[in-house]
Image: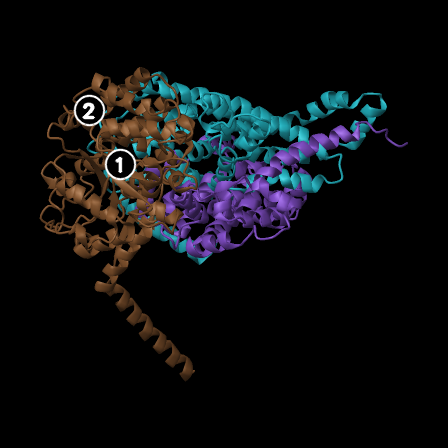
Amino acid sequence: MKPRKAVARTPLHLAILFFVGVWFIPTLGLLITSFRDPSNVAGSGWWTVFPRLFSGGQFSLQNYVGVLRDQGLGIAFRNSLIISVPATAISTFIASFAAFGFAWMRFSGRRVLFMMVVGLMVIPLQMTFIPVLPIYSKLGLAGTFPGIWLAHTAYGLPLTTYLVHNFMSGIPKDLFDSAAIDGASPFKTFSRIVMPISVPALASVFIFQFLWIWNDLIVGLVYLGALPNVAPITVSIANLVTNRGQDWELLTAAAFVSMALPLVVFFSLQRYFVRGILAGSVKG
Amino acid sequence: MRKGFVVLLALTIVGLAAIVGLAEMKYVTVMHGWPGEQAPAFQKIVSAFEDANPDITIIVEVVGRDRPALLATRLAQGNPPDLTPHPWIGTMKQWADAGEIVNLQGIVDTSDINPALVPIGEYRGGLYGLFIFPNVKSLVWYNPKEFAANGYAVPDTWNELQALSQEILDDGGVPWSIGLESGAASGWPGTDWIEDIILRTAGADFYDQWVAHEVPWTDARVKAAFEVFGDMFTDNFVLGGATGALTTNFGDAADPLFLDPPAAYMQKQATFINGFITDHFPNLVAGEDYAIFPLPGISADATPDGSIPLLVSGDVVTVFNNRPEVIKFAQFLTSETAANIWSSELGELSAYVDADPAQFDNPITRQAQEMLLNATVSRFDGSDLMPGEVGAGIFWTGILDYVSGIDLDTVLDNIEAVAQDAY
Amino acid sequence: MAGELQPSGGKASKNRARIGERIAARLDRSAPGRWVLRTGRAIARWLRSVRWNSWAFVAPALLLIGFFLVYPTVTTVVRSFFGRGTSLFGPNVEYVGLTNWKYVFTNEIMLTSLRNNALWAVLFTACTVGFGLVLAVMLDRVKYEKIAKSIIFIPAAISMVGASIIWKFIYAYKPAHLDQIGLLNGIVVAFGGEPLGWLIQRPWVNNLCLIAVGVWIWTGFCMIIFSAAYKNIPKALLEAARIDGANEWRVFRNVILPLLGPTAGVVATTMVVQVLKVFDIVYVMTNGNYSTEVIANRMYKEMFNYNNYGRASAIAVVLLILIVPFMIVNIRRFVSQEGGR
């Protein structure tokens, strides 16, 4: 039996269009401005390009060239990669280890410790810098990439452990029982059975962490500094905002350069994100 | 096998040579937050130094608004940059008290610095900041061509200035452009106005008492100064009114003067705005298309000898780590070479003791330099001398609050409350 | 299931045992030595009883968290009872008791910040969770779901600085007689109004403008989570309700909402925890001026700009105290989930 049209289609489409429009227009404005001439940007609104969209002479790549070459954003991009990819990988690994331990292993204090780990999500990061940094410095980790990998991992652990744990606790117990019968060690169970199943959840956590770390400003600034050979792209852009606060054409181009990679990551791994992130939380 | 061994040996020799070579190379880290045109100018100074000292490499770290935070965390870590130019005299004194910066007395020779500037960096008998990047703040910038076209005369007295503003208004123009926005530091241009006004209405001695918090912020003379500033926002004297001033970035506030037709005719700002003007309008010629006149005195009681008080500010260089190469670079910064690069690149003032104003190409720099040398009454920017909570905190937000309509007594009470705690 | 540490037999362990006996014998000769021996044996007993494999899994995480999160929290709480200064505990730092605490709860700017954080907590959470839910349900019914979802999620991929640039541009003001370059004023002027300085209109308009930026960024995240949960609802349930004659609104209220309740709980708590820490948006767009101050920004200023570490610590602890009730709710849910397993 064909289900009747329960919702009038037009209002639905209009409502969606409204939301999508409001969400997209700011980004569109950014995109258009990044291709415009500085004098145009200061003189007229970006929406004025539309009447003359195809008449030429309005757009150029000069802002992007300027931003990548003159403002050193190319190197900053590389730095952000060096920071984000390993940090996210390490973070996801350690979080999945811990989540598995908390979800499926029995040891005293497990519940309390897990609550503490998740509860620490509330800590504002700035509070941790001054206690931690002198020790970091003595260990020789300040200003190094491995140093910031550890820092990002630690700061992200409460949330990522929580999310992975949410998923792992939903794995049917029978899988473990059969593994135990086969005499598999916990580590084997973890690597051979749990990890493969968890790939959707892990991929979602990976994306989420990657976005967070790529877009982070304050941790990069404090743990690495602003030296051009280590500064991530967010630091370079923040400096641009300070130095050229009203040069919108440069700021917008820089913002887009910074956005490019996270968007690519998001779009290519999107199916995991949709499927995996809370697959364990709604159970029948 | 033999080939491999030879390659390995060659690599080892090269590697050792590199290590030895690297060991010879000394590094000096500098952190600054100069925006716009000043950063490349400083880079030229750095290059000049590196050319003269091939065994020293300067590593420059540019940090914008978060520099205080970064310096604080690096100090806590124990690895601050070797050297930093900054305007925060108040913080410099705190650093000195905590023993975190180097007393340069006897270590750096200050004979190349204009003696009028040296005392700014002195504190409790020690020298903690080299005042080598000065700028003058009491300047009104205008467009001489527009003035000539409209028959406007450069005012010599405050009354003439008021009359000029009224004349511009009557002609249908807007006299003043004010830009108070500056990201995290929004409000500081307004503090410059207040400081200039206090110097001209209450005198330099009162200024000193006010900065040291020996008189409260609620004093009638402080209030009167604020009111002089606030009165500017009546009618149409300021471009865009209060909202315009609050939302315009300081670096863009000079632009309206050079539009066609001009959107405003005067702007009060320090010498460094020169770099912003040339950045936005590369074809303008100093002296012809843009020029300065000093902000006139207001009250004869405040300046009995008829001189015009000068508000001066700028960056002092503070050293965190006492190493020979660091001191060498600091010494170089005081030299004539460095001063010349700075002033020729930016049209900025030179701190060099024997700087001859006639040598500057830029007529504005010449004029400002003469003002600096000849001033009988000059004071350093008050908000930079005050403790951070006040000078870089409540004073700034107080300006914003006052301009956006909050009652003046409330604003002054708030500032006074914080000041009592902070001093 | 978790394995125990099995002692390995063979020559190596016999050698270890012999060396151990010799050390034990030597220690036994003196009183302090015997104390060492006793503690050592107690530790060894505890070590043997622990399930090594379990700890190996959680140890890395616990170590990192202990160093980066727990230790600073403890020092911050202690530091809040001490005075101004730039270092953790140094020669210039003196005990001031409750002075900082008094400041936090009575100072006008702090009270403004607390008010603003409350505003953020309520409006931001309601909007992100509400919009996220509604969007998830609506988009499920259209063919272009995937691209619409992507568009709504894009802001989450933009850094805070990037988002602030975009929205500062939207809120830009030019005097009325000049052309507007900011979108919002462009619209206002097109409808015949006067342009406004959006970010300087205190006390509600500018706060709402800032909150709008936050909602713009985070709604996509909520939507994605709700979408995954919504798709997990068996279609049969919804069909059954429809066949029974319920209209869409009824279906939404009586079937969908209850089933998504737990998800909404998780999402809402996560959002509240995030928003109470809100810093970047306010810091970059207004820096707390014009009555937009929030607690995290206040802490940052006190710590780094005014070098008053004691006060900054007190503010940080207040932030923690505010968030704790929400964490308790979250943890209660975890416990009840646990009970079901």
Total marks shown come to 2
Image coordinates of residue B36 in percent, x first then y, are 36, 47
Mark 1 residue type = Val
Crowding at dot 2, Cα within 10 Å, few <14 / some 14-19 / many 20+, comes out as many
Q: In the image, A148: left or right of C6?
A: left
Mark 2 chain: B
Classify residue B225 by image quadrant. Answer: top left
- Closer to the camera: disc 1 or disc 2? 1
Does the image show residue A177? no
On screen, residue A167 above or below B84 = above
Residue sitting nearer the eye, A216 or C18: A216
Q: Which residue is mark 2?
A: B201
Classify residue B272 by image quadrant. Answer: top left
Disc 2 secondary structure class: helix
Image coordinates of residue C196 in percent, x first then y, are 49, 27
Q: Quadrant of the N terminus of chain B?
A: bottom left
**Which badge, 1 or 2, is on the more N-terminal residue?**
1
State the purple chain: A
Residue sitting nearer the eye, C136 or B111: B111
Q: In the image, B127: left or right of B18?
A: left
Q: Colour of chain C?
A: cyan
Disc 1 secondary structure class: loop
Mark 1 chain: B
Q: Which mark is residue B154?
A: 1
Crowding at dot 1, Cα within 10 Å, few <14 / some 14-19 / many 20+, comes out as some
On screen, residue B244 above or below C6 = above
State the brown chain: B
